[in-house]
Amino acid sequence: MRFLIVGGFVTAVLSSAVAALLFPEPGARVAVVALLVGGYAMWGRSLVSALATGVTAWMFATGFLVNGLGVLSFSSDDLVRLAVLLGVGAAGHLLGAGPALVRALGGAIQAYAVRRRRSAAARPRAAGTPHAPGA
């Protein structure tokens, strides 16, 4: 996971540089950074690295793309930007890890059903008790 966090830092730096070169307005720059944060989170499939990448991207976006000279601020717009980048990171993680989570949940449900059927079949019945389906 350590390498995913380092990769997230590199993603934040490079996405900020690309956004600064391509777009003059801060909103478009942040949108580019958010898009790349989501893509990295989807690829990395680690919630911790996705959130760390979102925070790092917020620092670069606020410090260099919105404000100048690396100045961080905590106005309401900055906190909204932080929430958006964290949300995009979490959504990217869910999109990347979602299919594996669904498969794991489906496998767990199937294993539970098999265990339940086996235990019902192995349950001894008292002599003279009729077999009732589902009992």
Image (cartoon, rainbow, N blue to C red):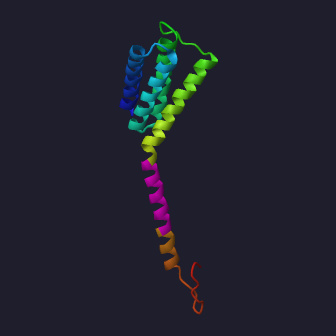
The residue positioned 64% from the left and 19% from the top of the image is 76
The magenta stretch spans which residues? 99-113
The residue positioned 57% from the left and 82% from the top of the image is 133
Residue 22: in magenta span: no
Q: Quadrant of the C terminus?
A: bottom right
Relative vertical location of residue 109 with respect to residue 125 in this rendering, above or below? above
Relative vertical location of residue 105 with respect to residue 53 in this rendering, above or below? below
The picture places residue 83, in percent across and down from the top left corner, at 57, 27
- Residue sitting at the far top: 69
Magenta segment, prevailing SS (helix, strand or loop): helix
Q: Quadrant of the N terminus?
A: top left
Relative vertical location of residue 36 with respect to residue 19 in this rendering, above or below? below
Relative vertical location of residue 69 with respect to residue 6 in this rendering, above or below? above
Residue 107: in magenta span: yes
Q: How many marks?
A: 0
Front residue of this view, candidates 64 and 35: 35
The residue positioned 42% from the left and 28% from the top of the image is 36
The picture places residue 40, in percent across and down from the top left corner, at 40, 32
- Residue sitting at the far right: 76
The picture places residue 48, in percent across and down from the top left corner, at 47, 34
**In this rendering, position of residue 10 left or right of residue 83:** left
